[in-house]
Image (cartoon, rainbow, N blue to C red):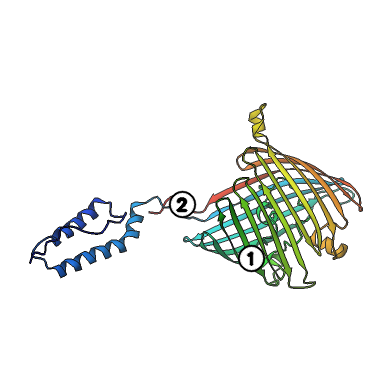
Amino acid sequence: MDTKVTSVMFPLPASVKDNALKSLLGMAVSFTRRKTVSRRLQGILLSGIVLFLLLSSPAWIAAQNPDIEKPVPILTGSAGAFSFVTAGQNIIDTQINPVLLVPLGDHWLIESRAEFEGAFQRPPGEGPYGGAVDKHVDYAQIDYIANSYFTITAGRFLTPFGIFNERLYPVWIRALQPDPLILPVATAPSDGAMFRGGFPVNAKANMNYAVYVSATSIGIGSVDSERHVGGRMGFFFLGPRLEVGGSWQKALQDERKNAFGFHMGWQPAKVPLNLRSEFAHSFEGSGYWIEGAYRLSQSHFWHKAMRRTEVVARAQQFYTGEIGPDGDAALGLPAANTRESDFGINYFLRDGLKGIVSYGRQFSSAGNANQWSFGIAYRFLVPLGRVGTQP
């Protein structure tokens, strides 16, 4: 009986493109063509070849793609020195905000940010500037990146209420150095767990989400928090480059009240404009801000200088809540209904370094005041390991 094998009826996987592996496969197939080899032995040999190829494909692909990036720890962050003059009183503010990122394989990430800030003021009756240096941990968390759509976070994290607290707070990123009046509303630090991610809704829109729960204070002054639960959801429309979303938070201590918020961000494709806005409502207070930052890169005169210049304007309003003047002072909120307008200029001296100047005017029943700010902000990044590819 003729047992000659005339063909191999399975396609080669993509990994079988190396000459050495092809030669090995060719020798095995040639062996099975011999008439002296039984059909049973041929089947066993071919099955072994297929199994070998399937098991070796991932390793072989990795070997043929040596340019796989190797994650390394990174020390980054920002630093700044500013002078804030409000109603004639000057405060020298210096701060450094180091951020440490430690990747552990492809799915785990440890990240933390600390803040060292000194606010120095001249006492009444003249004299040298003096003041305390505040040191605290903004966040210290571990992330498990399950896939492109879902990440689990545990530890101390920035509360995802609105967008300023998470995305715009660092001095290098923010367009104006004075905080928005409503920043303290529902943004107390969180110690607990968070689930977040995003996915495409259709070809024109993506959705992002975050759901979190925070435990009570753990008894360390620099890592205090409050008990609350909440979430945020946003939709980003790819065509107009527009994001809109909302936030919700329920306090699980004291008054146990709800807080609500809405946010918007727009970056038109044809104009170097960043337009952002937030609204927040809670028993602590309510208000909104809207801010536009325009880069003068399309200017037809002094182009070299103008392309480094950004002009900013912000309008905002705050309405007091139910916690009283002492509660407002404890949170850093205005003690009276307040309106404020701010105008500023940022000049990017080079990549990672910018100078800032701004002027604002506050109007409230507690008194009107001018607010000036001057300073410089710096961004740094230092790899804490050998940058390159895996061997």
Residue 140 in picture, x, y percent from top left: 61, 63
Which corner quadrant holds the N terminus? bottom left
Q: Secondary structure at mark 1?
A: strand
CB of mark 1 within 8 Å of CB of mark 2? Answer: no
Question: Which is in the foreground here, disc 1 or disc 2?
Answer: 1
Q: Quadrant of residue 70?
A: bottom left
Please name whichever residue, 71 or 246, is drawn nearer the observer in this view of the structure: 246
Residue type beneath disc 2: Arg
* Dot 1 alpha-carbon crowd within 10 angstroms: few under 14, some 14 to 19, many 20 or more: many
Comes first in the chain, label 1 or label 2: 1
Residue drawn at x 87%, y 58% is: 335
* Dot 2 alpha-carbon crowd within 10 angstroms: few under 14, some 14 to 19, many 20 or more: few
Q: Which mark is residue 211?
A: 1
- Residue labelled with disc 2: 386
Please name whichever residue, 349 or 145, is drawn nearer the observer in this view of the structure: 145
Residue 237 in picture, x, y percent from top left: 61, 50
Q: Quadrant of residue 185?
A: bottom right
